[in-house]
Image (cartoon, grey):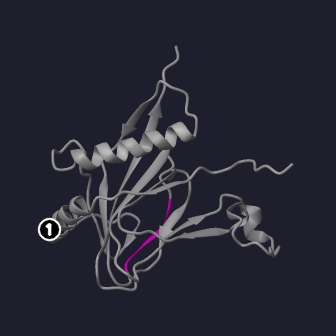
Amino acid sequence: MYTEIFGIPFFSTKLELDKVNFSLKKEFLSLEKKNKGVIKSNSGGFQSGNLFFDDKKYIFLKDKLLLEINNFLKTLTVKEPFNIKYYPFWVNINRKNNYNKWHCHGSHHFSCVYYVSVPKNSSRIIFNTLVLHKKTCNIKYTNNNILSMCDELYYNVKEGCFIIFPSYLEHMVEPSNTTKPRISISFNIDIEQNYD
């Protein structure tokens, strides 16, 4: 019998929101011009301060993303009833040589990233293993597609891609190779359950 233990959930889907992405791209590039942004995990590029899903221009996107988050939580068999507490989101814009350093969002349950614009030759998101031993062993495998045996996972994203992963999972964005903007929005969620 083969099974895995200590599995890490990871969710990815593609949303067909071309018109929404077009208007978000315009909105966020304008925000970048008007605003210095903040420095957190970003090295170069632009990272906005907090933005709010309850702003009427983001409600449609919020509803689409919450639907996918609910699907993910049901797949995980999270006991119902539960409430999804979502936090403000921020915008990341990277161009040539911009990247995001290794970091995690460990005080939350899950982190989410939606990709508004992903030009050709822009960067991948990389996830790091939590298991220190994997970094210190040199075992070679004939099947490199076994994700549970990876030290790092290099994940290619496309425009409209939405990913969800545990907030404790360390990740980074590698340097971009294009002058065109790679635009994503990121946010964290917590699951609230009350069984008193």
- Residue 165, above or below 136: above
Residue at x 66% of width, y 58% of height: 130
Q: Which residues are magenta?
A: 98-103
The residue that mark 1 highlights is: 30
Residue 169, position as x, y percentages in the image:
56, 56
Q: Nearer the viewer, residue 150 or 61?
A: 61
Magenta stretch containing residue 32, yes or no?
no
Residue at x 75% of width, y 66% of height: 134
Residue 53, position as x, y percentages in the image:
25, 45
Is residue 52 at least partly visible in the picture?
Answer: no
Choose top left, top right, bottom left or bottom right for residue 120.
Answer: bottom left
Residue at x 77% of width, y 63% of height: 133
Q: Is residue 39 left or right of residue 106?
A: left
Q: Is residue 45 left or right of residue 193?
A: left
**Predominant secondary structure in magenta?**
strand
Graded by Cα atoms within 10 Å as few (under 14), some (14 to 19) or many (20 or more), the crowding at tag 1 reads few
